[in-house]
Image (spheres, rainbow, N blue to C red):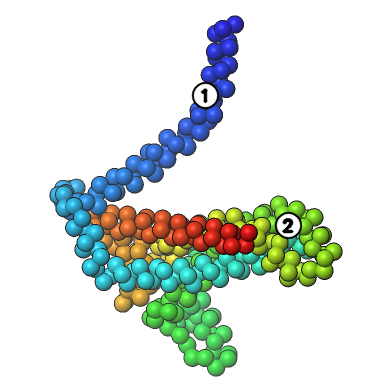
């Protein structure tokens, strides 16, 4: 009996750790170890062409990066594309979720439809949008011509290329965020809306006074996730250029940090410098996440 009791006690206390152990093991192998190893590499002059030969240089890679105009250009491009894609994307997702939360015909089909862009191959999506934004035969320029606007070379200018790439990102991820908002909306007690309707609140007032405040944790989550994805953007600008060159256009007008890191690591073979860029990007993402958390907590306290 004592042995059985001991086994039952071990099962009760040890089983939860056993169930979650596979995640932490995989995270340690494929997440934590590469992160730590990349940090070590960033303090070395590491050239892949020399068979992995390296020399400890301390903070030299970081000092060079801070003085590199190409790095600051890539950072500016990344922030610009992030703002142009994330803010409209989340606002549109909130509006779509609000519409889908009403009783509509074929509501299930509509909900499935908004997710289709997300499950489509990113390569196929970017190639299609690259054709749409073509300078000579693109449909976007054709539509602009109907209202008297001349053709735009979307890849040549900084802002036009950022707008085109942001459109690709928005089209791909708006429906995904809309379904997340929709799931949270359906968890809001319906009694709140009934009470507000009895008090004479309009649908718009109900949305801003009931729906949005109750969605605050979800909005924080989608903002943080969109920030992480937006600051790591790489495939869209790489494919939008129409070539495999990671310079982001002829004048680096839409080269992002991820593209700059790829260029330094796998085109210039400067593995240590690329690792320093990767760790800097990780730090920037962490700062943005903390700022988002502090701002939303401050807003919540002010409303209380």
Residue at the spot 21% in from the left edge and 61% down from the top edge? 63
Residue 148: x, y in percent?
55, 93
Name of the residue lying farthest toward the bottom: 148
Q: Position of residue 214 (x, y in %)?
A: 66, 57
- Most distant residue in the right direction: 198
Q: Which residue is mark 2?
A: 108
x, y percentage for residue 120? 55, 59
State the quadrant of the N terminus: top right
Residue occupied by mark 1: 14
User: Furthest-top residue in view?
Assistant: 1
The numbered disc on residue 239 is none
Sequence-first disc among 2 and 1: 1
Horizontal side of residue 59 vs 211, given as left or right: left
Instruction: Tell me the quarter of the image containing the C terminus.
Output: bottom right
Q: Secondary structure at mark 2?
A: helix
* Residue drawn where x is 58% and y is 90% of the image: 146
From what the image shows, is residue 12 above or below residue 33? above
Question: Residue drawn at (58%, 59%), measured in percent from left and top?
Answer: 301
Write the residue at 54% across / 87% down: 144
Question: Residue 189: x, y in percent?
Answer: 75, 53
Q: Is residue 47 above or below residue 142?
A: above
Q: Quadrant of residue 193?
A: bottom right
The answer to whether residue 195 is left or right of residue 95 is right
Marks 2 and 1, how far apart at CA = 42 Å
Tell me the quarter of the picture where residue 91 sits.
bottom right
Q: Secondary structure at mark 1?
A: helix
**Residue 174 visible in this rendered orientation of the protein:** no
Tell me if 141 is positioned left or right of 45 in this view. Answer: right
Marks 2, 1: nearer the viewer: 1
The residue lying toward the viewer, choosing from 53 and 180, is 180
């Amino acid at each position: 009996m004592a042995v059985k009791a001991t086994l039952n006690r071990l099962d009760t206390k040890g089983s939860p750790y056993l169930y979650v152990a596979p995640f932490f093991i995989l995270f340690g192998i494929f997440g934590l170890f590469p992160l730590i190893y990349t940090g070590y590499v960033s303090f070395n002059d590491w050239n892949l062409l020399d068979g992995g030969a390296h020399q400890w240089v301390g903070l030299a890679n970081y000092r060079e990066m801070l003085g590199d105009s190409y790095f600051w250009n890539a950072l500016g491009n990344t922030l610009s594309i992030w703002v142009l894609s994330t803010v409209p994307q989340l606002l549109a997702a909130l509006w779509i979720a609000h519409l889908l939360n009403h009783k509509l015909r074929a509501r299930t089909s509509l909900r499935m439809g908004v997710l289709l862009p997300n499950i489509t191959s990113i390569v196929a999506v970017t190639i299609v949008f690259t054709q749409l934004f073509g300078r000579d035969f693109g449909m976007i320029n054709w539509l602009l011509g109907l209202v008297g606007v001349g053709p735009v070379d979307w890849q040549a200018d900084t802002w036009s290329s950022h707008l085109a790439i942001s459109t690709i990102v928005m089209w791909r991820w708006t429906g995904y965020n809309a379904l997340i908002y929709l799931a949270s909306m359906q968890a809001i007690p319906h009694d709140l809306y009934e009470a507000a309707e009895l008090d004479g609140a309009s649908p718009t007032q109900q949305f801003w006074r009931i729906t949005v405040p109750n969605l605050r944790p979800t909005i924080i989550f989608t903002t943080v996730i969109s920030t992480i994805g937006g600051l790591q953007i790489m495939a869209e600008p790489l494919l939008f250029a129409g070539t495999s060159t990671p310079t982001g256009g002829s004048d680096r007008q839409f080269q992002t940090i991820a593209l700059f890191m790829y260029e330094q690591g796998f085109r210039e073979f400067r593995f240590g410098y690329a690792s320093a860029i990767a760790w800097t990007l990780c730090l920037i993402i962490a700062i943005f996440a903390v700022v988002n958390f502090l701002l939303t907590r401050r807003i919540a306290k002010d409303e209380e």
